[in-house]
Image: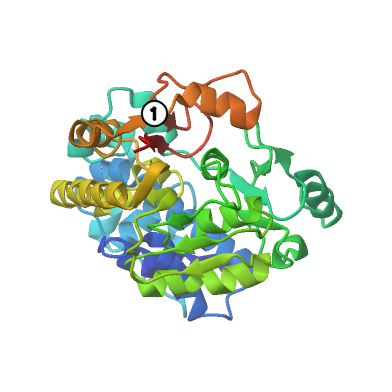
Amino acid sequence: MKEASRVQAIIEILGEVLKDSLPADVIVDKYFKERRYIGSKDRRQIADNVWKVIRNRMSYTEALGGAVTPRLLAAMCFADADLDLLFNGEEYAPAPLTKEEKTALRQAAAIDPLSDEAVYECPRWLLDKFENKKLLEALNMTAPVDVRANLTSREKARDRLKKEGIFFSPTPFSPIGLRSEDRVNLNNCMTYQDGEIEVMDEASQLIALLCRVKPHHKVIDYCAGAGGKALAIGALMNNDGVVWAHDISQERLSRIKKRAERLDILNIKTIKDVTDTDYTRFIIDAPCSGSGVWRRSPDGKFRLTPERLADICRTQAEILDFGAAHTKAGGRLIYITCSVFCEENERQIEAFLAKHPEFKPLDHRWLWKDTLEMEFYPFDSDKWLKFSPLATKTDGFFFCALQKACE
């Protein structure tokens, strides 16, 4: 595939991304599925440059004076190249740049971003939520590839990956995790296809471990989505016991079956209506802003609105109340988000505890040290855990385990 043709593909993908209606990874995947003739090397180069544009969208927009089009953004991405060769008008290549486009690009090249929005690549209303701007900078960096060993030791999984010419290092906290700082394509990896590894950020791995699920427990992953944490917990239980998985979207929930087959996880059962009130572990992986995973989905910040965030917070509070009523006396209600915003995290817990005095947070310092047999504690509070690229070199997650009083 010629470089100019790759630029045209980038322009076409950006045309959909800029609508801010669907996640960019969904758009990219759909584009490639509809064009299977595009080779893996070309796909990677196209995708890398799409993500480069998304990560620099605010600074590119400011430099262009707001005159943003997919063509201009793609040209900004290749500013150091010969744009006349890339925009040459040949078959499968972009049409030549117009006089107006060239003028806009020349002016953009002379402008250094001045606004905080451009410097930190974040819309103003979200920027104001970050006291620590270094966290915002970290959330705009590319994330490493983390995987967990599944029904095997990470040493065996690492050795098998090495034999395939794929090199991972142990994660610093999770005893089941491996990390590659380089981008790795696992689609043709036999270790992955045979279910010995599963892609999972280290923070998610740690959360699955910290749920402290035992085979005799009655467990539900209430907002299971496609089942990432349910499958990890099922593996940690070595296929003993049962993990119930529920999600409001039956389409998302249906994906668990295929994933479970590849991973050879046999103890996951899906449930449509949750009526029992005696769950030993009621795990809420709550719907949230997704601000903690902007390293992987930087476009998420452009699809979030104040109204949407307010709706999410209301939903979270409702789900917590529901979970409280369905957790058995002496059981644990576990609240998780992939957000770094306090209104979705500690403020939710504080408001919940004011309404539900029968619950108390566990001593999370003890939970961490007892579960992981690790003295180092990278968090500021004993009441909850706040993972982040700064504190733990992971995605941003919030975890709080609440114990319900015995009757």
Q: Residues within 10 Å of mark 1 (few under 14, many from 20)?
A: some
Between 243 and 185, the residue placed more toward the observer is 243
Between 117 and 290, the residue placed more toward the observer is 290
Residue identifier under label 1:
135
Up/down of 75 relative to 21, above or below: above
- How many numbered discs? 1
- In the rendered view of the protein, which quadrant contains the C terminus? top left
Between 11 and 190, the residue placed more toward the observer is 190
Q: Residue at x 41, y 70 (%)?
A: 271
Up/down of 304 relative to 360, above or below: below
Q: Position of residue 363 (x, y in %)?
A: 45, 24
Residue 58 visible, this orientation: yes
Q: Position of residue 51 (x, y in %)?
A: 44, 53
Kindly identify the amino acid type of the residue bearing the numbered disc 1.
Leu
Left or right: 353 as drawn, with respect to 141: left
Colouring scheme, one of rainbow, by chain, secondary structure, one colour:
rainbow
Left or right: 120 as drawn, with respect to 228: left
- In the rendered view of the protein, which quadrant contains the N terminus? bottom right
Single out the residue that lies furthest toward the front: 407
Single out the residue that lies furthest toward the left: 307
Q: Residue at x 42, y 42 (%)?
A: 331
Single out the residue that lies furthest toward the right: 163
Between 14 and 130, the residue placed more toward the observer is 130
Q: Position of residue 332 (x, y in %)?
A: 42, 41
Residue 87 visible, this orientation: no
Left or right: 233 as drawn, with respect to 156: left
Label 1, secondary structure: give it.
helix
Determine which quarter of the picture holds residue 39: bottom right
Determine which quarter of the picture holds residue 336: top left
Q: Residue at x 46, y 77 (%)?
A: 90
Q: Position of residue 25 (x, y in %)?
A: 43, 62
Left or right: 101 as drawn, with respect to 337: left
